[in-house]
Amino acid sequence: MAPADARTRRTDVLVAVGTAVLSLGLLLGLPPLDEADPDSVGIRYPEVGGVPWTLLAVALLAQSAVLLTARRTPRVALVVVAALPVALAATATSTVFGLTALPVVVAVVLAALRVPLPRLWPTVAATAVLVAAGTAVSSADQNGASIGQGVLQAVGAVGLPLVVTLIVRSRRELRAARRDEAAARTAEADARSAEAAAVSREQDARVDAAVSRERAAMARELHDIAAHHLSGIALMSAVVDRQIDTDPERAHDGVRQVREQSTAVLEDLRRLVGLLRDDAPAERAVETVTGIVDLVEQARHRTAVELVVLEGDHPLADGIGPLTQLVAYRTAQEALANVALHAAGAACSVTVDDRDPAHLRVRVENGVPTAPSVGSSPAGGNGLRGMRERAELVGARLQAGPTGPGGWVVELVTGREAPPASDLSAHDQEVAG
C-alpha cells in the first residue's frame, strides 16, 4: 500500500473510532450527570445494559462503522447513517435519541468536503427528512411538538454543519486558487527570465559573429594594404640597391617612388583606423572600379601593365553597388601585388569589361616571369583566400589559376544590383511607345 493510501485509511479509521467513542461516552455519561444535577426535571433514561440501551449503543456503533466508507461512497454513507436510528426511534426517548445525530453531523461534513453541492443536495434533503422523522417519532409523546422538534434537529444536525463545511471548503479552494495563481506567476516569471536569457545569448552570438566578420574584414584590408604597397616597396628597394652605383639618377627616382608608396601605406592605414574609430571619420572615400585606372598607373613603376577598359553605352560600373565596387578594386589590387611578388618581369594586362548590361568583368592576367621572384610571406595563400571571401560576400564569381603558357589569371565576374542608366532609358521609351 502506498504511503498516501495508508495515511488516508488511518484518517478514516480515526474519524470512525473517535465518533464511536464520543457517542458511547455520552450515552454512558449523561445519566450520572443528570442525577447529580439537583435542578434536573427528571428526564427518563434507558437502563444501562437493558434492551433499549443496547439497541441504541449498537446503532451508534453501526453509524460509526459506516463512516469508514464515507471516502469511497460519501452520499450512500450519509443516507445509511441517517436511516439506521429511525428503526429505534419508537423505543428511545428524544433526549437519548438525539445522540444519533452526532454520526450524522460527521457524515454531512465528510460528504460536503468530497462532493460538489449541485450533486449533493438531493442526498442532503433525504438525510434531513430521515433525521426529522426519527426525532419526531421519538418525541411523539410531547403534546404535538414532535414535528417542530424534528425540524430543529434536522437543521442542527444537517443544515448548520453543511453551511459551515461549505464555507470552510470555499476558503480552502480560494487558498488553492491563490497558490495556483502564484505558481503560475512564478512559472511565467521563470519563462520570461529564460526567454530573456535566450535573447541575451542570441544577442551575444550575433555580437560575436559581427566581431568575427569585422576581424576578417580588418585582416583582409590589412593584407591588401601590406601586399600591394609593401611588395612594391620591397621590389623598388631591390632595384635601387642595384642601381645606386651604376645609375644614380634612376636610383633617385626609385627612392622617390619608395617614399610615395610609404606615404600611401600610411594614408591607407590612417583611413582604416578612422573607419574603426567612432570619433575619427574616414579621410578617404571607399575605392571604386574607376580607381583601378590609378591602381594600374601605380603598378607600372614596378612591372609592365597594360590596361584595357571596355565601356558600354552607360557610365563605368553603373548599377554596381559600392561594396561590390570595393571588392572589384581589391581583387585587382591583390592580383597586381601577386604579379609583382611572384611574376617579376612578366607582361601583365588588366581588363575591365563593362559592356554586358547584366554583369561586370575584371580580369588580371600575366605571362611567364622573366626574373627571380622578390619573395613571399611564409604563410602564403591569404591573398587568394581573401579574394574568394570577398567574392562570396557580394555573390560574385571568382576564378584564379594558372594559364597554359605558364602564367596566371584572376577573373572576377559580378552582377549588377540595378540595370544601367542606358537600359532604363530604353525600357522607358519602350513602355512609352
Image (spheres, rainbow, N blue to C red):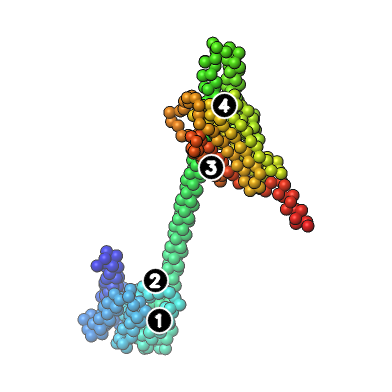
Tell me if residue 220 comes above or below residue 201 in the rendering.
Answer: above
Query: Residue 74 at x, y = what percent?
Result: 35, 77
Task: Indicate which disc residue 303 carries.
Answer: 4
User: Disc 2, disc 1: CB below 8 Å?
Assistant: no
- How far apart in space, not on screen, are marks 2 and 3 (Cα)? 81 Å
Which kind of residue does numbered mark 3 sit on? Leu
User: Which element carries disc 2, helix, strand or loop?
Assistant: helix
Q: Is residue 370 left or right of residue 284?
A: left
Which kind of residue does numbered mark 4 sit on? Thr
Classify mark 3: residues with Cα within 10 Å, few (<14), some (14-19) or many (20+): many
Going by the picture, which residue comes out furthest to the top?
245
Which kind of residue does numbered mark 1 sit on? Thr
Residue at 58% from the left image edge and 43% from the top image edge: 413
Query: Residue 236 at x, y = what percent?
Result: 55, 20
Give the image quarter of residue 117: bottom left
Mark toward the start of the polypeptide (4 vs 2) = 2
User: Which element carries disc 4, helix, strand or loop?
Assistant: loop
User: Disc 2, disc 3: CB below 8 Å?
Assistant: no
Which kind of residue does numbered mark 2 sit on? Leu
Disc 3 marks which residue? 398
Mark toward the start of the polypeptide (2 vs 1) = 2
- How far apart in space, not on screen, are marks 4 and 2 (Cα)? 101 Å
Disc 2 marks which residue? 113
Disc 1 marks which residue? 123
Mark in front: 1 vs 4 = 4
Residue at 49% from the left image edge and 38% from the top image edge: 404
Mark in front: 3 vs 4 = 4
User: Which element carries disc 3, helix, strand or loop?
Assistant: strand
